[in-house]
Amino acid sequence: MYQQLSFIDASKPEPRLPVDYQPVVPEHFHPERIYLSKGSLSSDDRKQFVERICRCFGDAEVAERLDTPHNKIDLGEPDPLARHRKGKRTLVFGELGDSVRFSSEEQNTCPNYWHFSPYSFCPYGCKYCYLAGTPGVWFSPTVKIYVNLPEIIQKIDATANRLAEPTAFYLGKLQDGLALDPLTAYSTILTPFFARHRYARQIILTKSADVTRLLGLDHGGHTILSWSINPPEVVQRSEENVPSVDDRFDAMQRCVEYGYPIRAVMMPMIPVENWEDIYADFVRRLLGAVRLERLTLGGICSYRNASHLMERKWGKANDVSDLTRRQSTSPDGRLRYKSDIRARMYGHVIRIAREIRPDLALALCLEEHRIWQAAGLTDCIGRCNCVL
């Protein structure tokens, strides 16, 4: 029997919250109110961490709700759209007990994977956001920072050592993985942890262009960075309060230069007018600018609540609803475009990508087996963005 080596052992200090750093206000997040929920001030480390960030928002109203869990903060807005908009301007500090979980998708080809949550939700304003319709966010659509980072790391360590093989832990399923990093500096703790771990690997999905804290860290190739991207013509119609596509490209290039493995997720692809030329031009530009390791494609795959909220934000006649309104839900309960539209869009992008990068790994996200087959990617099932 070999001895399992861990990042956390008797010879190394236990992980802590970031200390001795200066929080930076993210360009796209300016909360009007801050709630300190249960567990947020339960130790000196947590208190100092929370106070350091609160000082960045001197005009924000700060309220203690120390007996209230993070997901029970009442915003006083019965209307879902008003509650959603207020939540985007609200920061909640708390602790999350069930912070490291295994995905349990059924009725699609998702391979399922481990994911973890030092944050929940995000400050960005994508009109199509599927996360806004999930139960945990629908009733509590606030931007959350969980202060039990050391305990989260310990759970990742224990899980990875139990599995005893290289395993991805995904940061991006229930949040943007980097949007709040300027405030928290969590990457300065997480990235070195994964770099030194025998088994645990980190995959981050983000729209953020602020990678300042990542540059200079010892990552050892164990942190994979993935950007959510779409052509500017699509972003301008469907995303608000987000970093520009040019800024995301710049961030990706900087991280390539620093040796991080880089991926991209083009999702949701939206068949706007002249989409064939728009996506072809964009794929050529993307692959000419950034040396990607993997490109994953996906369409709309929302639940009904998210679709209702999208129509409240975007109007009932929009680029997505016009294609999904008369569709029945897929076997996994998600609402999608017709299968022929999805297959045609994926096939078009795949053909362009293979012309430029025949070696590029390609995959689909949350899709059905027949769509993988139509796209010629059956052999790639299970090798998509969120896994190694």
Image (cartoon, helix red, strand yellow):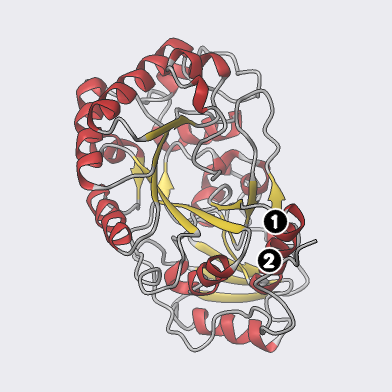
SS for dot 2: helix
- How far across and down, in percent of the image, does residue 52 sit? 51, 84
Q: Residue furthest front?
A: 1
Q: Amino acid type of disc 2?
A: Ile
Residue tagged 2: 152
**Crowding near the residue tagged with mark 2, few <14, some 14–19, many ≥20 C-alpha atoms within 10 Å:** many
Tell whether 1 sits left or right of 142: right
Residue tagged 1: 100
Quarter of the rendering occupied by the N terminus:
bottom right
Q: Residue at x 41, y 63 (%)?
A: 29
- How far across and down, in percent of the image, does residue 291 sit? 28, 47
Closest to the observer: 40 or 281?
Answer: 281
SS for dot 1: strand
Q: Residue at x 19, y 31 (%)?
A: 281
- How far across and down, in percent of the image, does residue 139 sit? 66, 48
Residue 182 in view, yes or no: yes
Mark identifier at residue 265: none
Q: Are marks 2 and 1 in contact (CB under 8 Å)?
A: yes
Q: Amino acid type of disc 1?
A: Val
Residue 325 in view, yes or no: no
**Quarter of the image holding residue 257?**
bottom left
